[in-house]
Image (cartoon, rainbow, N blue to C red):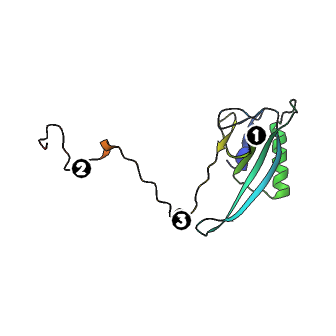
């Protein structure tokens, strides 16, 4: 989900809720402690230099149970970060505390912002010797011109 999508959704909402991949809601008294731009400049295992940029939200729970972040307040924080940090219309990555800081993608289901699981991946499979995944076939899908069939007289 891009930053512009989040802003459009916030304009339509009365309350904000985030749902974890396991279906639990982030407690409603969460704070957005950071909105920023993260730049990752790296080299992959195949030797290719890469640059990635994402907009980042950090969610945090405090003892402030009466606090509720309203959509217009988050929209103001986003707009200030765009102006001050020069954040463009980037994909969103959300940080949320679990056993360690978790990084999530972001989607929207019409009611909740959904924190989606992210996975690591090799970006240079063709250069580092990782074999392509072979398609899995069922024996019933394999047909041969020389195959026996019941009543076919081949046995």
- Front: mark 1 or 3: 3
Picture coordinates of residue 154, whole percent (x, y): 13, 44
The numbered mark, 3 or 2, whose residue comes first in the sequence reads: 3
Q: Which mark is residue 10?
A: 1
Left or right of 117? Residue 67 is right
Q: Which mark is residue 111?
A: none
Disc 3 secondary structure class: loop
Q: Is residue 17 above or below residue 154?
A: above
Query: Residue at coordinates 66% horizontally, 35% vertically from top-left?
Result: 110
In this view of the protein, can residue 1 be seen by the observer?
yes
Mark 1 surroundings: few (<14), some (14-19) or many (≥20) residues within 10 A:
some
Viewer-proximal residue among 58 and 79: 58
Q: Is residue 5 above or below residue 87?
A: above
Quadrant of the rendered structure where residue 62 is?
top right
Using the numbered discs, state the Cα–Cα distance from disc 3 to disc 2 in whole angstroms: 36 Å
Q: Which mark is residue 144?
A: 2
Quadrant of the rendered structure where residue 139 is?
top left
Mark 2 surroundings: few (<14), some (14-19) or many (≥20) residues within 10 A:
few
The numbered mark, 2 or 1, whose residue comes first in the sequence reads: 1
Where does label 3 land, which residue? 128
């Amino acid at each position: 989900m891009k930053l512009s999508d989040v802003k459009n959704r916030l304009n339509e909402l009365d309350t904000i809720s985030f749902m974890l991949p396991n279906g639990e809601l982030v407690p409603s008294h969460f704070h957005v402690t950071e909105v920023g731009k993260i730049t990752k400049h790296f080299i992959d295992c195949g030797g290719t230099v890469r640059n990635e940029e994402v907009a980042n939200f950090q969610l945090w729970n405090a003892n402030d149970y009466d606090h509720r972040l309203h959509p217009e307040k988050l929209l103001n924080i986003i707009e200030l970060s765009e102006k001050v940090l020069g954040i463009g219309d980037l994909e969103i990555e959300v940080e949320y505390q679990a056993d360690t800081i978790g990084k999530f993608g972001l989607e929207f289901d019409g009611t909740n912002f959904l924190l989606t699981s992210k996975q690591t991946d090799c970006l240079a499979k063709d250069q580092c010797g990782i074999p392509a995944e072979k398609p899995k076939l069922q024996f019933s899908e394999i047909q041969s011109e020389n195959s026996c069939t019941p009543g076919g007289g081949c046995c």
